[in-house]
Amino acid sequence: MNTLTLLLQAAAGQQAAPGGGLTFWLMIILMFVVMYPFMIRPQRKQQKELEKFRNELKKGDKVVTAGGIYGVVDEIKERSVLIKVDGDVKLRVDKNSIVRDYSDTNAA
């Protein structure tokens, strides 16, 4: 037995049970407690920032779609965005496919 198992069993005040018992559930709970601040919380924060960005879109914003299409916002509707790609070429894309703003970067 390893040291962690012995410490958990001593803390629980019981003998080793074949198949895990309380030790198994303590390890599962510990795993979720460790995972939350390092994985789940930052991902939720990133999703909220992306949703805020999409809701604040306005005409003239330079954006990139999930497919890698660069364009300038020309019209915004509830669920879709019309982006001007090149010259007179315009594409209507789903609002959820807009992933970032590229006005600060040097894009070609």
Image: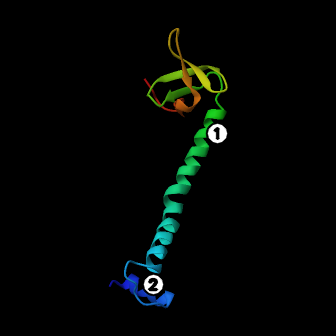
On screen, residue 68 versus residue 91, left or right, reads left
Determine the CA span between mark 2 and mark 1: 44 Å
Q: Which mark is residue 80?
A: none
Quadrant of image for the C terminus:
top left
Q: Which badge, 2 or 1, comes first in the chain's sequence?
A: 2
Q: Contact, CB < 8 Å: mark 2 with mark 1? A: no
In the picture, the quarter occupied by the N terminus is: bottom left
Q: Nearer the viewer, mark 2 or mark 1?
A: 2
Residue bearing the label numbered 1: 52
- Residue type highlighted by circle 1: Lys
Residue 62 pos. (x, y %): 55, 25
State the image coordinates of residue 26 (x, y, percent, origin top left): 48, 76
From this view, report whether residue 17 is shown above or below residue 75.
Answer: below
Front residue of 64/21: it is 21
Residue furthest toward the top?
Answer: 88
Residue shown at 57%/44% (left/top)? 47
Question: How many discs appear?
Answer: 2
Q: Position of residue 7 (x, y in %)?
A: 43, 86
Q: Is residue 79 left or right of residue 42?
A: right
Would you call the spot at circle 2 few (<14 residues within 10 Å), some (14-19), or many (20 or more)? some
Q: Nearer the viewer, residue 2 or 51?
A: 2
Residue at numbered disc 2: 8
Q: Secondary structure at mark 2?
A: helix
Q: Residue at x 58, y 40 (%)?
A: 50
Residue in the image at 53% along x and 61% along y: 36
**Disc 1, SS:** helix
